[in-house]
């Protein structure tokens, strides 16, 4: 049954009548047209659907929208224009971190989370932080370099 | 102008990172119905009856009776039906497609079908297949292909041998796990079916769909959507989805989407061919290899698909980078009631290279020699005769590649220090990969055409049917055109492949895109440059021309040059082994390649690293088992691919060796990167554990069970 | 189609649990996978969200115990300064950060998967669970709580409120998870082992194995046999200790591993613990 849910999406308060059990992933894609959030597996294994929930990285495929009542949700659409966001995009392009691109928005959310959490992340910290974001194209190395570069504010 | 290898920013990088790129499931097609397959639950059975559920308004069932043309999917053969007719051959085979607006209702409807089967004896192993269990599935011998090759005088060599070593090597299936699952949307537009999909080969899809609908070539339109990874998994499998979808769109005249969920994709899409390769080696008194005899068997699964072509690549790579004086080979692709096996990066070569390299390691061990030193003695050189009695036409730079790889990895010191069974190991593999279609296929089968068009605003458009699927093709093709025309890359526009718009430059497969089609783009651009007039519209066409130096290919006897050129590589893998849990961790990875001249070093390094990690996944993590024909690892939690913590930082380098026929000297690079990871890994684990192995995935369970 | 409830307080939650037959939903990282379906998750019953209740998120020291609210996330437990090392190690290896930011220990416990990674340390550390209903509360020992895969001692109207972990002093500790890969992995088998050795004598020892039976394997009688031994005596007894454990570790074959492997690795890890870890 539909209920009224209020939460903050990319900095804006929103309110919707919706079934609270609907996955946040589907709400973002279908009801909010935020298609940067991808479904890669639907079981919390791949990280393509990563979003920030109250500043922490989570899998939006495992979250019923009813549980984000009052919380702040951020997707790539809300991050890409920010200072950090631009730096991450730049670093990903510069370091060769992008191939097919399907995991990349999720990686970008991960990168943003890392940049907020660590001032100077080591490559081990980056690898651990991104261990739930799978990529089948790159072998990860260039993604790790990109996050390092973004954290340093430019090319490493 | 810059050196062609100097990296540029990929043209699609920013859009993809920032989430602007619309993959097929991201696009808004207006009122879209969904399609869901009813699938076989049995590996082999006669379909006695299919009782359809009562349908709510707005729901439809599409099956074999709705097909206006042939119920056959045209790939190479046409044995795979769109919808099962009177029998099913594997678990997951399409029986019908249910179409309607609500995906939940579709699932319920699929569950309400009552399918009655009469089970037949299922062919669940290569042994079953060879024994023709339950009667042959294909022809009268279950062989999709049974090939023979002969070079030199192997019989005599075996007769005169001082010692013969024979062993069998096996590899498992591999699931592609492209991050974007299979997805297609069909719309009825301008009186015909227009298919949009995540795919590698727009013209393959068209080729498959037109006979099913009974229409002419241009009676169907296929447009590639941005493709979130493919690796061969979107070469032929899209034919399976799109044929059924096209029948539904053609009948209902409505827009319909089919989007696989991950579990559905893992269980029902094609996989890499499992292999069983037996190698028998003849050695003379001095311990020199005088001949090799191969028996190479691939599990082809329930339908032919492209198993024959995959097998050709397996057998043409049987001796890898080595010049073996005499060879004899039998290669078979066998029919079973497993899911059909199909294209996967490397296309049969990784299986051959794994068997060969591991076999060579064991020969070296028996000879008491370091495997690298042992293998070096047999390196091919310019002029070497290949397994198909063709020739190596290029300078083989393996010694330079090896020297650089040793320098980067400190191989010699480590190999000496670690010894056998000291829980640390380093392994090194040698491999090559023939560029483009086998034999004369590029001329006889494909005969690629490309079009380059300068608009009046002096922007140059590239029209090809090869797709960007992550490998960087949009950027490398644009780079070739820009560099040739001496204009900025911003002045190049890569046209989204669409069968109504672009010429057929062939499929995006076989490491052919750069070396064949990229070269044509370069030639067309050169022509355009000569005709260039500012502000005028000019269109230039270029057709494929076969190099004149090749030894002509005979497709019946498989004699001649199987490939005009090869790329070459070395992978070095260093591991740590835990004898308590039998687990292995990878601690070092180094790669050196001759891919001619890399068109963009960073893009090629991306291929090298991604391909290596995929190959390592196949080597030790990615276990897929069949039980009574049913896949056991059905989720991404159970079919595990490498994470950030499974692989360390990777170092790469190139040895330049310009190929005169390739654009800017380039050769293929997309697939060779999957050829060497597995044998290098296994070699390292053999050193670390002191055990000997012959089967991948080399899981801790297998390591435990292996004797010394 | 399922209904969902979102109580504003613990009292309201207990009232709902009393009146209805509900699935308690904390982080949902297991439930959402188990009930995945097109369009909407297909829960068999109505669902009550409780992850947001502050009363259930607290982690605090109480005397010689650490009390962990059932809805505390795995990340919160991982980063809490008072979390015992063995538990922290186990929690830090569950799935990946995104999942740990959402998954809770209460959920991990009530899901009662034989491969649930926080459970073996709770067995080994003698943890107890506080269950609450409208009628009152009761405390159950970890090993009495689990009845089999997916089955627990929790009654329909009860919720798991807190996990009570005694903060004992162990001077030798070992946690090892053997998973399907280096990270984001499901467990093939695991060992959690701890000992207190004073003056060359084993005062206390605790050994638990995960993912090798319908519930966690811990045997107090076998531990009792080791307690009181000197290190030298224990070393001599290693073969018989291994053979004792061999009899009670009875794993299965599944899509992730084999019974033979699981058993062998558990015994190897135990041997390694007794021989190597207990050296110093």
Image: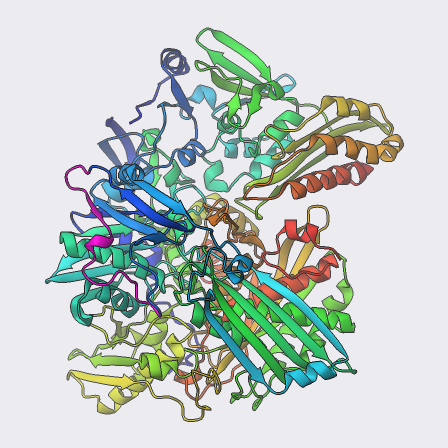
Name the image quarter holding residue B197.
bottom left
Above or below, comparing residue B223 to residue B654 in the picture: above
Q: Is residue B184 left or right of residue B426?
A: left
What is the number of callouts on the image? 0
- Image spot of residue B327 (x, y percent): 61, 81
Name the image quarter holding residue B461.
bottom left
Residue B58 magenta:
yes
C192 and B32: which one is in front?
A: B32
- Image spot of residue B571 (x, y percent): 59, 69
Q: Is residue B409 left or right of residue B669?
A: right
What range of the chain is rendered magenta? B55-76
B692 and B98: which one is in front?
A: B98
- Image spot of residue B9 (x, y percent): 37, 68
C258 and C200: which one is in front?
A: C258
Q: What scheme was used to colour the molecule? A: rainbow
Residue B527 magenta:
no
User: Could you tell me which residue is drawn at 43 percent across and 41 percent down?
Assistant: A44
Of the 4 image quadrants, the one containing the N terminus of chain B is bottom left
- Image spot of residue B431 (x, y percent): 57, 74
Point out the residue furthest to the top here.
C135
Name the dominant secondary structure of the magenta segment. Answer: loop
Of the 4 image quadrants, the one containing the C terminus of chain B is bottom right
């Amino acid at each position: 049954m539909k209920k009224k849910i209020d939460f903050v999406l990319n900095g804006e308060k929103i309110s919707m009548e919706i079934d609270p059990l609907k996955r946040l992933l589907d709400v973002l894609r279908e009801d909010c047209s935020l298609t940067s959030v991808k479904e890669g597996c639907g079981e919390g294994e791949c990280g393509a659907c990563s979003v920030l929930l109250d500043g922490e990285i989570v899998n939006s495929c495992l979250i019923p929208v009813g549980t984000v009542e009052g919380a702040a949700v951020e997707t790539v659409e809300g991050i890409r224009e920010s200072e950090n966001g631009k730096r991450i995009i730049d670093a990903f392009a510069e370091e060769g971190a992008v191939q097919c691109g399907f995991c990349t928005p999720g990686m970008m959310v991960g990168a943003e989370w890392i940049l907020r959490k660590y001032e100077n992340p080591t490559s081990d910290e980056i690898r651990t932080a991104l261990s739930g974001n799978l990529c089948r194209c790159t072998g990860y190395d260039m993604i790790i370099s990109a996050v390092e570069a973004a954290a340093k504010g430019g090319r490493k | 102008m810059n050196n062609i290898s100097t990296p540029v920013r990929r043209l699609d990088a920013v859009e993809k990172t920032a989430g602007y790129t619309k993959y097929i499931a991201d696009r808004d097609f207006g009122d879209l119905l969904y399609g869901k397959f009813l699938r076989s639950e049995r590996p082999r059975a006669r379909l006695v009856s299919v009782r359809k559920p009562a349908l709510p308004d707005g729901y439809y069932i599409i099956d074999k009776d709705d097909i206006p043309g042939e119920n056959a999917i045209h790939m190479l053969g046409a044995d795979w039906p769109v919808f099962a007719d009177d029998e099913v051959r594997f678990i997951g085979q399409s029986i019908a497609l249910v179409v309607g607006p609500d995906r939940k209702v579709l699932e319920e409807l699929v569950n309400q079908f009552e399918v009655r089967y009469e089970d037949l004896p299922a062919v669940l192993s290569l042994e079953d297949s060879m024994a023709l269990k339950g009667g042959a599935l294909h022809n009268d011998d279950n062989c999709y292909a049974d090939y023979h090759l002969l070079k030199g005088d192997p019989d005599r060599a075996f007769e005169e041998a001082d010692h013969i070593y024979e062993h069998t090597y096996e590899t498992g299936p591999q699931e592609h796990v492209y991050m974007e699952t299979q997805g297609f949307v069909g719309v009825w537009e301008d009186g015909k079916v227009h298919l949009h999909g995540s795919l590698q080969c727009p013209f393959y899809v068209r080729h498959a769909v037109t006979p099913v609908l009974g229409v002419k070539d241009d009676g169907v339109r296929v447009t590639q959507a941005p493709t979130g990874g493919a690796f061969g998994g979107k070469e032929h499998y899209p034919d399976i989805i799109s044929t059924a979808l096209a029948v539904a769109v053609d009948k209902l005249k409505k827009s319909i989407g089919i989007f696989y969920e991950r579990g559905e994709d893992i269980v029902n899409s094609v996989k890499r061919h499992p292999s069983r390769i037996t190698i028998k080696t003849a050695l003379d008194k001095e311990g020199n290899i005088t001949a090799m005899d191969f028996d190479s068997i691939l599990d082809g699964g329930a339908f032919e698909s492209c198993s024959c072509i995959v097998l050709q690549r397996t057998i043409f790579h049987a001796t890898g980078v080595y010049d073996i004086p005499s060879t004899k080979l039998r290669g078979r692709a066998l029919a079973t009631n497993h899911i059909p096996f199909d294209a996967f990066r490397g296309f049969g070569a990784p299986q051959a290279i794994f068997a060969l390299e591991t076999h060579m390691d064991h020969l070296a061990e028996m000879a008491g020699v370091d495997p690298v030193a042992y293998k070096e003695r047999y390196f091919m050189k310019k002029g070497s005769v290949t397994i198909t009695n063709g020739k190596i036409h290029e300078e083989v730079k393996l010694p330079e590649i090896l020297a650089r790889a040793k320098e980067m990895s400190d191989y010699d010191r480590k190999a000496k220090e670690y010894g056998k069974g000291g829980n640390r190991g380093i392994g090194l593999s040698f491999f090559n990969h023939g560029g483009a279609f086998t034999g004369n296929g590029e001329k006889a089968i494909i005969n690629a055409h490309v079009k380059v068009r300068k608009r009046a605003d002096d922007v140059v458009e590239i029209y090809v049917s090869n797709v960007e699927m992550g490998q960087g093709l949009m950027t490398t093709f644009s780079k070739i055109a820009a560099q040739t025309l001496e204009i900025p890359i911003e002045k190049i526009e890569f046209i989204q492949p669409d069968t109504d718009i672009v010429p057929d430059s062939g499929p995006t497969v076989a490491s052919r895109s750069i070396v064949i089609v990229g070269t044509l783009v370069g030639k067309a651009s050169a022509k355009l440059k000569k005709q260039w007039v500012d502000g005028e519209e000019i269109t230039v066409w270029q057709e494929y021309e076969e190099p004149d130096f090749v030894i002509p290919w005979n497709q019946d006897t498989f004699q001649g040059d199987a490939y005009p050129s090869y790329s070459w590589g070395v992978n070095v893998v260093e591991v740590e082994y835990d004898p308590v849990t039998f687990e292995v961790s990878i601690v070092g990875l180094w790669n050196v390649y001759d891919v001619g001249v890399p068109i963009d070093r960073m893009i090629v390094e991306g291929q090298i690293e991604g391909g290596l990690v995929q190959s390592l996944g196949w080597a030790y993590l990615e276990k897929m088992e069949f039980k009574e024909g049913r896949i056991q690892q059905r989720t991404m939690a159970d079919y595990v691919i490498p994470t950030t913590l499974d692989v360390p930082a990777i170092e790469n380098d190139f040895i330049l060796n310009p190929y005169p026929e390739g654009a800017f000297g380039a050769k293929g690079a997309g697939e060779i990167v999957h050829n060497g990871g597995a044998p290098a890994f296994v070699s390292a684990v053999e050193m670390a554990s002191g055990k000997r192995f012959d089967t991948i995935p080399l899981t801790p369970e297998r390591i435990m069970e292996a004797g010394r | 189609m399922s209904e969902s409830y979102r109580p504003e307080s613990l009292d309201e939650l207990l009232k709902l649990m009393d009146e209805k037959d509900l699935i308690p939903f904390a982080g949902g990282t297991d439930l959402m996978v188990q009930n995945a379906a097109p369009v909407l998750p297909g829960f068999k019953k109505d669902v009550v969200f409780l992850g947001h209740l502050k009363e259930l998120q607290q982690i605090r020291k109480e005397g010689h115990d650490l009390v962990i609210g059932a809805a505390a996330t795995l990340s919160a437990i991982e980063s809490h300064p008072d979390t015992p090392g063995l538990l922290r190690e186990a929690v830090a290896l569950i799935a990946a950060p995104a999942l740990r930011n959402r998954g809770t220990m209460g959920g991990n416990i009530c899901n009662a998967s034989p491969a649930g990674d926080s459970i073996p340390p709770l067995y080994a550390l003698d943890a107890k669970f506080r269950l609450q209903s409208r009628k009152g509360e009761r405390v159950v020992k970890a090993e009495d709580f689990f009845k089999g895969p997916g089955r627990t001692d929790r009654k329909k109207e009860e919720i798991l409120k807190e996990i009570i972990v005694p903060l004992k002093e162990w001077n030798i500790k070992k946690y090892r998870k053997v998973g399907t890969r280096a990270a984001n992995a499901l467990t093939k088998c695991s060992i959690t082992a701890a000992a207190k050795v004073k003056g060359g004598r084993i005062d206390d020892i605790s050994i638990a194995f995960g993912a090798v039976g319908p519930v966690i394997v811990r045997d107090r009688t076998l531990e009792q046999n080791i307690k009181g031994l000197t290190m030298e005596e224990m070393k001599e007894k290693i073969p018989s200790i291994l053979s004792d454990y061999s009899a009670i570790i009875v794993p299965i074959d599944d899509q992730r591993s084999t019974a033979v492997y699981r058993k062998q690795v558990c015994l190897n890890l135990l041997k390694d613990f007794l021989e190597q870890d207990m050296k110093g």
